[in-house]
Amino acid sequence: MLTVCHLYPDLLNLYGDRGNIIAFVRRCQWRGIPVRVREVGIGEPVDFGAVDFVFLGGGSDREQTLMAEDLLRRKDELQAAIEDGLVMLAICGGYQLLGRYYRTLQGETIPGLGLLDFYTRAGEKRLIGDIAVEAELGGRTVRLVGFENHAGQTFLGNIRPFGRVLAGYGNNGQDGTEGARYKNVFCSYLHGPILPKNTALTDYLIGRALARRGQDGILCPLDDTFEERACAVILRRLRLGR
Ligand code: GLN
């Protein structure tokens, strides 16, 4: 049984972020892997040690401020689980909060958990549009597509990016990096949502979660015709596909 933890589903759910939970769950179920979802809101208890996959979505600056304090209280427990190999996906606003801080355009600083070495500051120009990145998953290079919409520009310190921007802005529109990766934590600006369209990533996360529980993590293939078509549309739009 895999346990999925959806953090702050009522506050952080921009551009269909919930679709990430649906894709993760369905791709488990289609293969007969038992899975359950726990939604955790502000003040609600969760034992990260007993969870297999944590999803933290995107939100506006206002929503980020509302849940940042609650997330800070969970820092030690989350950190221990991450060090133990917890599989986690954090998108946009959720991604920003795992770093050192997020400075808004008004100059307000929202403290992050400081679990990962990066910071984010809002820029005048929003970084909006379709995006394609290249990332390495288990020794395989894959192309991922999504939609980004953020004012925050993220600058990485001593941490590797999740991927390399092929088209779009990514972390900051300047250095060609997208997202961040540490152990089994994957951070990205790709909304869309990212998991339904990018099945290689979804399956990689499921495989990592199973492997952490001592299973072989090898998944039987599914028919991804529709998902591949959805990717192809975005790649063509970005002049990257046939
Ligand atoms: N508030 C953040 C920004 O604009 C996050 C936005 C988001 O999650 N889409 O950078």
Image (cartoon, rainbow, N blue to C red):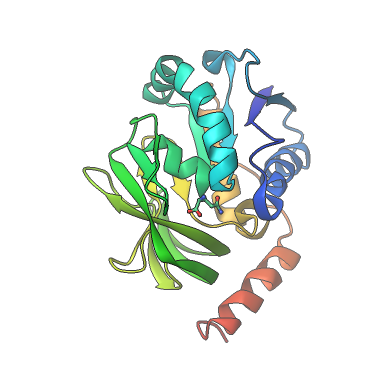
Residue at 47% across, 17% down: 73
Residue situated furthest front in the rendering? 106
Image coordinates for residue 215, horizontal then vertical, percent: 55, 26
Image coordinates for residue 95, horizontal then vertical, percent: 46, 43
Q: Is residue 211 above or below residue 238?
A: above
Image quadrant where one finds the N terminus: top right
Relative placement, left or right, of 36 versus 57 is right
Q: Is residue 72 above or below residue 29?
A: above
Q: Is residue 169 above or below residue 191?
A: below
Numbered marks: total: 0
Q: Nearer the viewer, residue 25 or 29?
A: 25
Residue at 53% across, 81% down: 238
Relative placement, left or right, of 73 versus 58 is left
Image quadrant where one finds the C terminus: bottom right
Residue at 67% across, 45% down: 13
Q: Quadrant of residue 133?
A: bottom left
Q: Is residue 97 above or below residue 131?
A: above
Residue at 42% across, 51% down: 106
Image coordinates for residue 170, horizontal then vertical, percent: 42, 63
Camera sees residue 207: yes
Q: Nearer the viewer, residue 48 or 115?
A: 115
Image coordinates for residue 72, horizontal then vertical, percent: 45, 22
